Structure formats: structure tokens, C-alpha cells
Amino acid sequence: MSVEFVVHPSDHPLAAAERAAILAAPGFGKHFTDHMATATWTPDTGWRDRRVSALAPFSLHPSAAVLHYAQEIFEGLKAYRHADGGVWLFRPEMNARRFARSARRLAMPELDEESFVRGVEALVRADEAWVPDGGSEHSLYLRPFMFAAEAFLGVRPAEEFVFSVIASPAGPYFAAGVAGVTLWISAEYTRAAPGGTGAAKCGGNYAGSLAAQREAREHGCDQVLYLDSADRNKLEESGTMNLCLITATGELITPGLGTILDGVTRDSVLALAPDHNLTPVERPVTRAELSEGCRTGAITEVFATGTAAVITPITAFRSPTDDFTVGDGAPGKTTLTLREHILDIQYGRTQDTRGWLHRV
Ligand code: COI
């Protein structure tokens, strides 16, 4: 069975001048390319109709299961243009494997790794002109997703699914970006419980995070830092990013997996840590260890990782009971060096000794 996506080019691509204006200042998630990739699944046919065609709205029955029971998963990865004009993906097979794990958790059909990667590649090739020049550190953000399209109101796994990939040219996720962001530690909201969907990348997790994010904004913060749901004492993740701490003794500590997202950037940073004289450690971190460590200097830097956010310095925390800064409140030096290191790999400015890059 072929896993190739058949290309039907759009009859009405955006004019080159309009595309260039968007690429000059893309923002994040606001503009979309000319095409989309799709495939459909039913129990009888398996995955079929793999195609790339003009970007267009879906037509869904009002009872489609995704609209009622949120049977939906997604991924995020980027295409980077190197100085020689070539376009590369960063560890797309990790996204493919996480997509399959998310599918299992949400009782959805798995898409094999090859089809996932071929779908992403086919879309990037069709919309190659939309991949920004690497000099600006802009990229083409790719959003693979899958949803339950069956028209049926009973609560059971659906029997009709759509896989799709769309693409959006992207600049920094946070306006403050590399200058550092502030996290709100909510006393009210948690994100995930053991046995729940915390490790899956499903839309429902993000819907549940929006009230907490609004609370963070109301307190002047950019994002939320979640604590565990059992005793609200251990750090979990930020709504769209994993969290990492650097200690004065040279450890790079991040909460272990379980109820948090298994981030591709998180995994890459753990692998790069020894190059920066840091010992990678995955272990629980309490809220008190964070606040005391920041006050005493035992914790010297904090940053967050994510595909959209890359490596974003965290410069301060706020909560209903206390506020504290990290170090002197400026982005950490090692954080910025790690950020440069990962960007250098992604944009082909340094050798990819780990085989993380995937040529499109
Ligand atoms: C990503 O970093 O790719 C994410 O999925 C975070 C967010 C934009 C939902």
C-alpha cells in the first residue's frame, strides 16, 4: 500500500507579493499557506485518500464526534530554511511517535510513522515558497492533527477520522520571547491527573488550560506553571511548554514524564546538556524547592522548552502567596547559549552530529 500523498496543486495560490509581506512579519498562527494535506480512515478501509490539495474548510455534520466529545489530537513541528536554500525538519519521527501514542490514549486509529512524515513532507514541498529565510529565525510551523468526523452522538470511539496537516509561517511565539517571560502558579487550576490525558497532545488539554491562562494574564503573567493535581506541590509543565531549571551545582533538572507532555525540545535539551557542562536530571521538583532555590541562588536559571516557544527564559514567578524572580530577573546566560545551540542545529549553522535533521 502506498503512503504517498497525491498532490493536486491549488488553482489560486496567494500572489508572491502578498506572501512576501506575510513572511516579513508572520507573527504566530495567523497566516496559512496555500495547501493542506489530508487522509481519511474508516475501519473497513484503513487510511486512504492521502492527498495534498488547496487549503479549504472542512464540511462536518453537526453531530460529528469531535464537536461533542473532543476526540482530537495534534502535533507541532517546524520546517527550517538553511543558508543554501534547503528545507529541513527537526526530529519529525519523534512527533510521529507521539502522535501515535496520543491516538492510542484517545482511542483513535494510529497513523504509521512513514505516512505521518510523508504527509508533512508533501505539504512542505507543495508550499516550499512559504518557508521563510532562516536569517530572521522565522520558520514554517506545521500542525498535523486528527479528528473524529463520524456523525453519531453515542459515546464510543468514532469510526471515521480525518488526518490533516496545515502550515503557518511563524515568528516568535511570545512577544517578549528571548527577553524572558513570567509564569503564574495557579492555586486553583491543575492540568492533568495520573491516568488522565496529560501525556497526550489532545485539544481537550488545551481547552482546559484557557481559564488558567486567562487568570495568568489577569495577574500580568505570560503563561501558567501547573502543579500536580494530587497535592499541588510538584512542578508539572507550563500550558504550552516543558520547564527546566539550572542549578548552581551544574544540574539541568526537569520534571519526569507521566502526566506531562514528552516534548521534543525537552528531550533535545536533555541530550545537549553535557555539551554545556550540565548533568541532565529528570526528577520531581517541589514548589518550595523552586521558590527557595531562586531566593538563595541554588537555582540560577529557569527556562521553558517547546516547538513554538523554542527555549524561552523564565525570569519571574507570581502566585497568590508569593512572587519571586530568577537570578537578577534577566535571561540566564546558559539558557541563551542552549537556545543558540539548538537553533544552530535547526538552521544548519552547526553540524548535526546526532542525526536530528530530516531533509525535505
Ligand atoms: C508547540 O509548541 O508546537 C505547541 O503545540 C504549543 C502550542 C502552540 C499549542
Image (cartoon, rainbow, N blue to C red):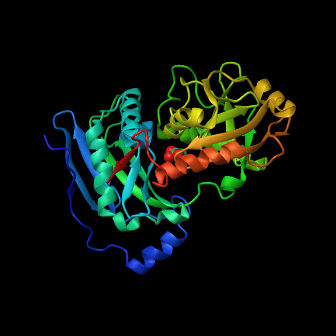
Q: Residue at x 72, y 46 (%)?
A: 333
Let me know if residue 34 appears in the view.
Answer: no
Residue 48 at least partly seen: yes
Spot occupied by residue 292 in the image (x, y as percentages of width and height):
83, 28
Of residues 162 and 223, the one nearer the viewer is: 223
Q: Nearer the viewer, residue 57 or 341?
A: 341
Residue at image position (34%, 30%) is 157
Q: Position of residue 271 (x, y in %)?
A: 52, 33
Residue at position x 72%, y 50% in the image:
180
Numbered label tally: 0
Indicate left or right for 178 with 132 as reference: right
282 w.r.t. 41: above or below: above
Where is residue 242? Give x, y as percent.
60, 36
Is 336 drawn above or below residue 289 in the view shown?
A: below
The answer to whether 48 appears left or right of 216 in the picture is: left
Residue 325 sits in quarter: top right
Quadrant of the rendering where the C terminus is positioned: bottom left
| The quarter of the displayed image where residue 25 is located | bottom right
Quadrant containing the N terminus is top left
Whether 177 is drawn above or below 305: the answer is below
